[in-house]
Amino acid sequence: MKKIGFWIYDLYNFFFSLKINPLRHIPNELTQFILMFYLSVMWTAVFTIWVGGTIYFGIGSVGAHLVVLFAFFFTALLFRDAEKNGHLWVKRDYKPKPKYYEADKNKCIWDLEREG
């Protein structure tokens, strides 16, 4: 029984711990959080549709089962892509500032000896 408990715990950590699951390869923590949030919303909707379909249509609901399979494969593909190309997910194209932009010119310095 203890072995099953640890298996469930390890499985839970694999999916929900950002230090263990494949989303750890994405360097930006905000992107990791947003992807986990979207996955949680998707899985909540999937299980709601599955339970509703099972209650409404009965046990043999093909559509609800297809929704669960789609969500499973979507999560697997997202994890696989994060593991392979996680470093590219947050790549941004920063444009250099124009030459006429000088922040030092617009700086306000408060001189207490002269103004106070």
Image (cartoon, rainbow, N blue to C red):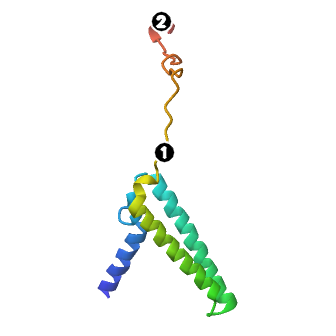
* Residue in the picture at 53% in, 22% down: 101
Number of the front mark, 1 or 2: 1
Disc assigned to residue 76: none
The reply to whether the C-beta atoms of the residues labelled 1 and 2 are less than 8 Å apart is no
Q: Secondary structure at mark 1?
A: loop
At label 2, the amino acid type is Arg
In the displayed orientation, state which residue is furthest to the right. Answer: 56
x%, y% of residue 34?
Answer: 52, 58
Report whether residue 18 is seen: no
* Residue at (50% x, 75% y) in the render: 73
Q: CA distance from mark 1 to mark 2?
A: 44 Å
Residue 6: percent from the left, percent from the top? 32, 79
29 is higher (above) or lower (below) than 41: above
Q: Could you say which is closer to the camera, residue 84 or residue 23?
A: 84
Question: Is 103 left, or right, of 57 in this rendering?
Answer: left
Report the disc number at residue 92.
1
The residue to which callout 2 is attached is 114
Give neighbour class at mark 2: few <14, some 14-19, many 20+ (Cα, 10 Å).
few
From the image, which quarter does the N terminus lie in? bottom left
